[in-house]
Image (cartoon, rainbow, N blue to C red):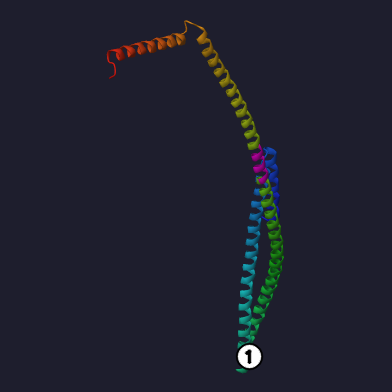
Amino acid sequence: MSIGRRISRIVRANRTAAKEKPTDPIQTVEQAHRQQLDLVDQARRSVADLAANRHRLELLAGEARAELDQLERRAASAVNAGDDDAARAALRRSLAVTKRLETLTRQRDELDTQVRQLDSNLQRLETRVEDNGIRYQTLKARHGAAQAELGMQDALTGSGQAAAGAEAAARQAELEARRVQARAAAHDELSWTDPNSRRVEEAFEELEASSATERELDRLKNRHPRD
């Protein structure tokens, strides 16, 4: 399959895939870049194959030239020896080899032209793909930076909302603590005004215990006066 037909199939496939479902633009660019790299590899193989064929033709042409030299020497030797039949046979063979050499040289020159043209096209394709690769990397970096920036903004927004919520909760907790403290202080204040409250009873019990202790201490002192 030629490179042009393959590119057309890739374009049609991309269009069909685009109609079926939306894709990430960065993934689309990455896929296109990989396909371009594949095309470059295919073009390189084509150039290498043509160069190999040209090399084989060059080898065959070299063999034909060597055979011509040998036939010319054989014909000359036959003439010197007076063997016209051998000289004629060598010359007839030389004519056939000359035609073969001409054909090989023509084919070699045609392949040489194709190789130079393909090599020039390959260099342009490689340059284009390299430029597209740089562009793809730039787009990918910019996309990644934009995604990171968006994530940072989302994080900052969420952090701000969380901080605001935490601050509001802290204020609410502080107000609740103040209310509890105020209620405790109020209960404490009211407990002294109620003669039947447990706190007043405990105070009287403490007072009575202190009075009884002092009376007992005085009694002991009277029974055991100091010298």
Q: Position of residue 96 (x, y in %)?
A: 65, 78
**Rendered residue at 46%/9% (across/down):** 200
Q: Look at the picture and state if 123 lies above or below 201.
A: below
Q: Which residue lies furthest to the front in this view?
A: 227
Residue for badge 1: 76
- Left or right: residue 79 versus residue 194 is right
Quarter placement of the N terminus = bottom right
Mark 1: few/some/many CA within 10 Å (<14, 14-19, 20+): some
Q: Where is residue 66 in the image (x, y as percent from the top left)?
A: 61, 81
Q: Is residue 106 magenta?
A: no
Q: Position of residue 92 (x, y in %)?
A: 65, 82
**Rendered residue at 65%/66% (across/down):** 50
Quarter placement of the C terminus = top left
- Viewer can see residue 13: no
Q: As rendered, which of 23 and 170 lies closer to the eye? A: 170
Q: As rendered, which of 17 and 130 lies closer to the eye? A: 130
- Left or right: residue 114 versus residue 178 is right
- Viewer can see residue 105: yes
Q: Look at the picture and state if 164 lies above or below 132.
A: above
Q: What residue type is labelled 1?
A: Ala
Q: In which quarter of the image is residue 131?
A: bottom right
Q: Look at the picture and state if 78 lies above or below 194.
A: below
Q: Where is residue 141 in the image (x, y as percent from the top left)?
A: 66, 49
Main SS of the magenta part reads helix
Q: Is residue 146 magenta?
A: yes
Helix, strand or loop under label 1:
helix
The stretch in magenta equals 145-153
